Image (tube, helix red, strand yellow):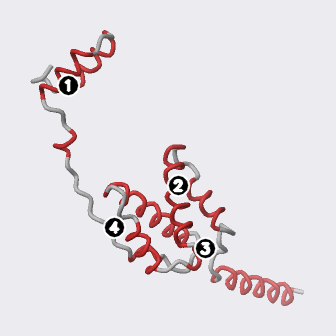
Protein backbone atom coordinates (compact mmCIF):
# COMPACT_ATOMS: atom_id res chain seq x y z
CA UNK A 1 0.00 0.00 0.00
CA UNK A 2 2.76 2.42 0.94
CA UNK A 3 4.70 1.47 -2.20
CA UNK A 4 1.61 2.13 -4.33
CA UNK A 5 1.19 5.59 -2.74
CA UNK A 6 4.90 6.38 -3.32
CA UNK A 7 4.68 5.30 -6.94
CA UNK A 8 1.54 7.38 -7.44
CA UNK A 9 3.19 10.45 -5.84
CA UNK A 10 6.32 10.00 -7.95
CA UNK A 11 4.21 9.83 -11.09
CA UNK A 12 2.30 12.97 -10.09
CA UNK A 13 5.57 14.83 -9.50
CA UNK A 14 6.93 13.68 -12.86
CA UNK A 15 3.76 14.80 -14.66
CA UNK A 16 3.76 18.19 -12.91
CA UNK A 17 7.41 18.70 -13.91
CA UNK A 18 6.56 17.96 -17.53
CA UNK A 19 3.72 20.50 -17.44
CA UNK A 20 5.94 23.05 -15.71
CA UNK A 21 8.50 22.77 -18.50
CA UNK A 22 5.96 23.35 -21.28
CA UNK A 23 5.68 26.87 -22.68
CA UNK A 24 2.75 28.90 -21.41
CA UNK A 25 -0.30 28.81 -23.64
CA UNK A 26 -0.92 32.02 -25.58
CA UNK A 27 -3.36 34.34 -23.84
CA UNK A 28 -4.84 35.60 -27.10
CA UNK A 29 -6.44 33.52 -29.82
CA UNK A 30 -6.59 36.11 -32.60
CA UNK A 31 -5.15 39.45 -33.67
CA UNK A 32 -8.32 41.24 -32.58
CA UNK A 33 -8.27 39.60 -29.15
CA UNK A 34 -4.58 40.45 -28.83
CA UNK A 35 -5.33 44.09 -29.62
CA UNK A 36 -8.10 44.25 -26.99
CA UNK A 37 -5.90 42.68 -24.30
CA UNK A 38 -3.04 45.07 -25.15
CA UNK A 39 -5.31 48.14 -25.08
CA UNK A 40 -6.97 47.16 -21.79
CA UNK A 41 -6.45 49.72 -19.05
CA UNK A 42 -5.24 52.53 -21.32
CA UNK A 43 -7.12 55.81 -21.57
CA UNK A 44 -9.86 55.95 -24.20
CA UNK A 45 -7.86 58.56 -26.13
CA UNK A 46 -4.78 56.33 -26.17
CA UNK A 47 -6.93 53.36 -27.15
CA UNK A 48 -8.43 55.30 -30.05
CA UNK A 49 -5.01 56.46 -31.32
CA UNK A 50 -3.30 53.06 -30.92
CA UNK A 51 -6.24 51.18 -32.43
CA UNK A 52 -6.11 53.48 -35.48
CA UNK A 53 -2.34 52.93 -35.75
CA UNK A 54 -2.69 49.15 -35.58
CA UNK A 55 -5.62 49.09 -38.03
CA UNK A 56 -3.61 51.27 -40.43
CA UNK A 57 -0.70 48.83 -40.18
CA UNK A 58 -2.89 45.73 -40.66
CA UNK A 59 -4.64 47.31 -43.66
CA UNK A 60 -1.25 48.11 -45.18
CA UNK A 61 0.42 44.74 -44.48
CA UNK A 62 -2.69 42.61 -45.26
CA UNK A 63 -1.59 39.66 -43.15
CA UNK A 64 -2.00 38.54 -39.53
CA UNK A 65 0.62 39.38 -36.92
CA UNK A 66 1.81 35.77 -36.94
CA UNK A 67 3.09 36.32 -40.50
CA UNK A 68 4.58 39.81 -40.10
CA UNK A 69 8.30 40.14 -40.84
CA UNK A 70 10.89 42.83 -40.21
CA UNK A 71 10.78 43.64 -43.93
CA UNK A 72 7.02 44.28 -43.58
CA UNK A 73 7.67 46.67 -40.70
CA UNK A 74 10.37 48.49 -42.65
CA UNK A 75 8.08 48.80 -45.67
CA UNK A 76 5.33 50.20 -43.46
CA UNK A 77 7.83 52.66 -41.97
CA UNK A 78 8.70 53.87 -45.47
CA UNK A 79 5.00 54.26 -46.31
CA UNK A 80 4.52 56.72 -43.44
CA UNK A 81 6.59 59.43 -45.14
CA UNK A 82 3.61 61.80 -45.42
CA UNK A 83 3.10 61.92 -41.64
CA UNK A 84 4.81 64.38 -39.32
CA UNK A 85 7.90 62.91 -37.62
CA UNK A 86 6.17 62.76 -34.21
CA UNK A 87 3.19 60.93 -35.74
CA UNK A 88 5.47 58.41 -37.46
CA UNK A 89 7.28 57.85 -34.19
CA UNK A 90 4.04 57.32 -32.23
CA UNK A 91 2.61 54.96 -34.85
CA UNK A 92 5.73 52.81 -35.02
CA UNK A 93 6.15 52.85 -31.23
CA UNK A 94 2.60 51.55 -30.86
CA UNK A 95 3.21 48.73 -33.36
CA UNK A 96 6.51 47.80 -31.69
CA UNK A 97 4.87 47.82 -28.27
CA UNK A 98 2.05 45.56 -29.45
CA UNK A 99 4.49 43.12 -31.06
CA UNK A 100 6.63 43.00 -27.89
CA UNK A 101 3.50 42.40 -25.81
CA UNK A 102 2.36 39.64 -28.20
CA UNK A 103 5.74 37.95 -27.77
CA UNK A 104 5.66 38.30 -23.95
CA UNK A 105 2.26 36.61 -23.66
CA UNK A 106 3.22 33.81 -26.05
CA UNK A 107 1.09 34.88 -29.01
CA UNK A 108 4.20 35.41 -31.16
CA UNK A 109 7.29 33.22 -31.08
CA UNK A 110 9.56 36.16 -31.98
CA UNK A 111 9.37 39.88 -31.35
CA UNK A 112 9.90 41.03 -34.93
CA UNK A 113 9.50 44.66 -33.92
CA UNK A 114 12.53 44.57 -31.65
CA UNK A 115 14.93 45.01 -34.58
CA UNK A 116 12.99 47.93 -36.06
CA UNK A 117 14.73 51.27 -35.60
CA UNK A 118 12.43 54.13 -34.76
CA UNK A 119 12.91 57.40 -36.65
CA UNK A 120 14.59 60.20 -34.75
CA UNK A 121 12.29 62.95 -33.55
CA UNK A 122 13.72 66.35 -32.76
CA UNK A 123 12.57 67.90 -29.53
CA UNK A 124 12.28 71.61 -30.17
CA UNK A 125 10.71 73.20 -27.10
CA UNK A 126 11.80 76.68 -28.21
CA UNK A 127 9.36 76.44 -31.13
CA UNK A 128 6.49 75.84 -28.71
CA UNK A 129 7.28 78.75 -26.41
CA UNK A 130 5.44 81.98 -27.15
CA UNK A 131 7.45 85.20 -27.20
CA UNK A 132 6.70 87.59 -24.32
CA UNK A 133 4.70 89.92 -26.56
CA UNK A 134 2.41 87.06 -27.62
CA UNK A 135 1.91 86.06 -23.98
CA UNK A 136 0.77 89.59 -23.12
CA UNK A 137 -1.53 89.63 -26.16
CA UNK A 138 -3.16 86.34 -25.08
CA UNK A 139 -3.59 87.72 -21.58
CA UNK A 140 -5.12 91.00 -22.81
CA UNK A 141 -7.64 89.17 -24.99
CA UNK A 142 -9.01 87.09 -22.10
CA UNK A 143 -12.09 88.78 -20.63
CA UNK A 144 -13.04 86.14 -18.04
CA UNK A 145 -11.37 87.04 -14.72
CA UNK A 146 -11.02 83.41 -13.65
CA UNK A 147 -9.32 82.41 -16.90
CA UNK A 148 -7.13 85.51 -16.76
CA UNK A 149 -5.99 84.58 -13.24
CA UNK A 150 -5.16 81.03 -14.40
CA UNK A 151 -3.20 82.37 -17.39
CA UNK A 152 -1.33 84.86 -15.23
CA UNK A 153 -0.41 82.23 -12.65
CA UNK A 154 0.94 79.94 -15.36
CA UNK A 155 3.16 82.62 -16.94
CA UNK A 156 6.83 82.99 -16.05
CA UNK A 157 7.35 85.64 -13.32
CA UNK A 158 9.20 87.99 -15.67
CA UNK A 159 6.18 88.18 -18.00
CA UNK A 160 3.33 88.37 -15.53
- First in sequence: mark 1 vs mark 2: 2
Residue found 9% across the figure and 24% down from its top: 158
Q: CA distance from mark 4 to mark 2?
A: 19 Å
Residue shown at 59% from the left, 77% from the top: 66
Image quadrant of residue 106? bottom right
Near mark 4 (Cα within 10 A), the count class, few <14, some 14-19 or many ≥20, is some
Could you say which quadrant of the image residue 159 lies in?
top left
| CB atoms of marks 4 and 2 within 8 Å | no
- Marks 4 and 1, Cα distance to the nearest angstrom? 35 Å
Residue to which mark 1 is pinned: 155
The span from disc 3 to disc 2 (Cα, nearest Å) is: 16 Å
Whole-number angstrom distance, CA of label 1 to CA of label 2: 36 Å
Label 2 element class: helix
**Residue 52: which disc?**
2
Query: Which is in the foreground here, disc 3 or disc 1?
Result: 3
In the rendered image, the vertical position of residue 44 relative to residue 6, given as above or below: above
**Residue under label 4:** 118
Amino acid sequence: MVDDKMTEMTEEIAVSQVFASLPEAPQAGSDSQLLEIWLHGRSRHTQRAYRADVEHFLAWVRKPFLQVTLANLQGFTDSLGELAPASRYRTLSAIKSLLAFAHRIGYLIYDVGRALRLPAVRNRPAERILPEGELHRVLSLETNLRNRAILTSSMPPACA
